[in-house]
Image (tube, grey):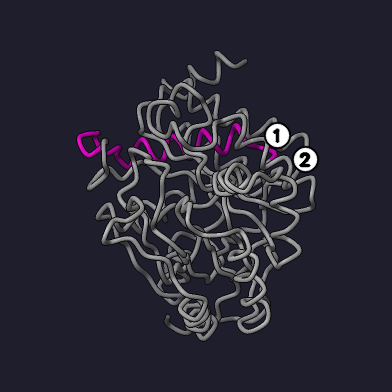
Amino acid sequence: MTRDLVDWFKNAPLLELGAEADAVRKALHPEGIVTYIVDRNINYTNVCVADCGFCAFYRRPKHNEGWTLSYEQIGAKIDEVKALGGVQILIQGGHNPYIPFEWYLDLLRYIKQYHPIHVHGFSPSEVDFWSTLYRMPAVEVIRELVKAGLDSIPGGGGEILVQRVRDQVAKKKAGADRWLEIMEIAHGEGLKTSCTMMYGIGETLEERFEHLTRLRDLQARTGGFTAFICWPLQPENTPTMSAQPKTDAVDYLRTTAFARVVLDNIPNLQASWVTMGMKVGQTALHFGCNDFGSLMLEENVVSAANTTYRTSIAEMERLIREAGFTPRKRRQNYQFIEEATTAAA
């Protein structure tokens, strides 16, 4: 079966892949609704010691372009997105060895007290980094974060969950097994999480499939993943991968469709218009995706690689309708928000 699926991924015509993925989407979401969320991606620091070869965003400690936001700066960003109807923040940052653990806990308490909003934050690689740096078991790190106000965990830092690939591009970051272990711990603590795949970093198609099957197997054990998102490497300005060819829309649509078929136990698939643009994002809705992602008032990591797409609520809803679906605003757990909103952001 594994061999058959990989052969199909490699050799099936694009539209055949799309039709199979669309059938999975219709079985899971027969009502023809495509969701989206209004949130903001807040990067609290760009200082990082992970040295990932694909990241154009980070700066090493003591670099004159390194920064860490204050609580007040983060609070102001939250107020801006709430004014536009935002219902969550996605908060992530570099592996900054100079920030004490209490800073993160106090940040969560500050947000919940003064700028209450759903906090979708701190990827497994950050949790692993803190576990090592502060000499705490990962489960204790997660429990302290939850106690302080963390609501859910994003799937950042997944890249390709095959150690051969990670050793080449992100050797200092949580390994494939550790990333999955931390997600399983989070699910065991009652947290819902998303999962991701960043491809085009030197992996084979078999390794993309291995990544997907590892996610599917974890989901079968825990049921904790709400959604899957994939996107290609954005190579511009990256430390070691600027010469890597940028994958095209066909590869994105094939990979997205294949993921929808393999990950039939993860309920939602998100279109990555942030990296691929609006037209490809619309097309992805017919290649297995039932979610148009986030308005994303702010985004820094992909933008650092010179890939920048922006939109508004009104345009997102128009694009979804033009693709033949009914738009619905949602929360992180994919519950619909009943208010109808058409105001431009």
Amino acid type at image mark 1: Leu
In the figure, is residue 4 to the left or right of 15?
A: right
Q: Is residue 17 rendered magenta in the image? A: no
| Marks 1,2: beta carbons within 8 A | yes
Instruction: Note whether 225 is above or below 169 in the view shown.
Output: below
Of the pair 36 and 125, the residue shown nearer to us: 125
Instruction: Note whether 217 is above or below 71 in the view shown.
Output: above
Q: Is residue 259 rendered magenta in the image? A: yes
- Work out which quarter of the rendered image holds the C terminus and state it: bottom left
The quadrant holding residue 45 is bottom left
Instruction: Note whether 189 is above or below 91 in the view shown.
Output: above
| Identity of the residue drawn at 55% across and 49% down | 126
| Identity of the residue drawn at 44% across and 77% down | 314
Residue 169 image point, x, y percent:
38, 32
Magenta segment range?
Answer: 241-265
Residue 222, numbered label: 2
Q: Name the residue under label 1.
A: 218
Q: Alpha carbon of mark 1 to alpha carbon of mark 2: how far? A: 6 Å
Residue 264 image point, x, y percent:
66, 37
